[in-house]
Each structure stands twice: as C-alpha cells, then as structure tokens.
Image (spheres, rainbow, N blue to C red):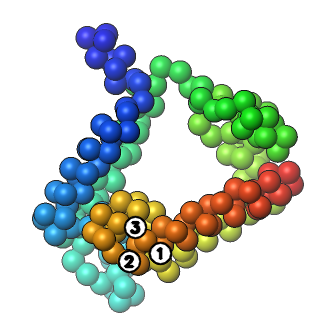
C-alpha cells in the first residue's frame, strides 16, 4: 500500500498524463461535447437566473451539467491532492529562477505554491494587489470572453478539434504570458 501512495505522490510522466488527457478529449468529442472551464461561469449564471436579465445567459444549462461536475471534481481532486498526496510543500525550481524571484522581492521562492508577497491580505489592499487581482482579473475575464474560451478550452479542446481560431488564441495566450512574465510582472512585483 505504501508503494502505491509513493507512486501517486510523484509527478506523473508526460506520457501517462498526456494519454489520460487524450482519452478524455476523445470521449468528449465522441459525445459531441467541448471542454472548457470558463464555460462554467456562464452555466452558473444561467443556473441562478441570469437569463432573465441577459440574453447571453438564457440557455438550457442542464445540458452542461457534465462540465459543472468536472469543475467540482477539479476542486475536490485538488483538495485531496494538496491534503494527502503532496509529500513536501517545496516546489522544485531552478537556482536561477530562485535568484530572479528573490531579486523581485519574493523572500522564499519555492517554499509554497503561492508566494505570500503576492497572495496575502496585506498585498490585496495595496496598489500591487489591485493591479494583480482587479486589473488582472478583469483582463482574464475580458480576454476569455473575447477569445471565446479559456486556455483549457482552446489549448486542449479546440486544438484537439483542429479549430484554427483555437490555434490563434493559444498563440495569443503564450505571447501575453511572455509579455506579462518578462516585461510587466517585474515592475509590478517591485512596487
């Protein structure tokens, strides 16, 4: 039993995780569904009556119950993995990345999943927090709606379905991520 738990606690190789993702995508395509977590926000708004005041939310959300269950499964699975399957909270990152993060004001890079210098109540009510959470949240929400889906929807489902729009969206996601990482985030973190 201990060997099984030790196996589960290790990161799975790409070929195992990739095969599982491919099987899930094949199953979704076979049954005529597409994958994307951001669609659940629309489903929840419709479920709670958003269709009465906005035509965008006026649809039969019950047809998307599988996606809501998938979202619940990711939350429960993440909780289980964090509570019982992570042997060590230290994140394996390179020495060069640790040095770069310390230079940007992150005191203990790799000690936890989310650095306290960014994800804390003190930061939340600062200019840095407003930029990261409010402006960043707005940009993610706007971008998801404008692109017609999120990174998981386009990169996993859209590319699996050979949709050209998803390829353009994924290229845009990577360009935006590189701009944020190398040009904007260093200035925001040193505020």
Examine the rendered structure and indicate whether residue 185 appears above or below residue 17. Answer: below
SS assignment at label 1: helix
Could you tell me residue 138's position as x and y percent?
61, 71
> How far apart are the two marked residues, 2 and 1, measured between alpha carbons?
6 Å
Coordinates of residue 127 in the picture (x, y in percent): 81, 60
Q: CA distance from mark 3 to mark 1?
A: 9 Å
Say whether residue 158 is visible: yes
Above/below status of 100 relative to 25: above
In the picture provided, is 22 more to the left or to the right than 53? Answer: left
Give the quadrant of residue 39. bottom left
> Circle 2 — which element?
helix
Q: Residue at x 83, y 57 (%)?
A: 187
The circle on residue 164 is: 2
How many numbered marks appear?
A: 3
x%, y% of residue 71? 33, 54
Label whose residue precedes the other's in the sequence (3 or 2): 3
Which badge, 3 or 1, is on the more N-terminal residue?
3
Q: Residue at x 26, y 81 (%)?
A: 59
- Residue, disc 1: 168
Q: Quadrant of the C terminus?
A: bottom right
Residue at the far top: name it.
2
Q: Is residue 113 above or below residue 31?
A: above
Q: Which residue is mark 3?
A: 154
């Amino acid at each position: 039993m201990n060997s099984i738990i030790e196996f589960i606690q290790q990161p799975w190789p790409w070929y195992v995780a990739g095969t599982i993702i491919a099987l899930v995508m094949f199953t979704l395509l076979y049954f005529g569904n597409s994958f994307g977590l951001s669609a659940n926000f629309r489903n929840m708004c419709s479920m709670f009556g958003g269709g009465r005041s906005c035509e965008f939310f006026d649809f039969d959300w019950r047809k998307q119950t599988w996606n809501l269950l998938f979202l619940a499964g990711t939350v429960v699975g993440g909780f289980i993995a964090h509570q019982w399957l992570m042997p060590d909270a230290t994140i394996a990152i390179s020495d060069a990345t640790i040095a770069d993060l310390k230079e940007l004001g992150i005191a203990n890079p790799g000690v936890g999943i989310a650095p306290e210098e960014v994800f804390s109540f003190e930061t939340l009510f600062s200019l840095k927090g407003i930029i990261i959470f409010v402006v960043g949240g707005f940009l993610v929400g706007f971008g998801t709606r404008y692109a017609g889906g999120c990174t998981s929807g386009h990169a996993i489902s859209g590319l699996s379905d050979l949709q050209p729009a998803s390829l353009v969206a994924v290229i845009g996601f990577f360009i935006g991520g590189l701009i944020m990482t190398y040009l904007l985030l260093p200035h925001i973190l040193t505020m």
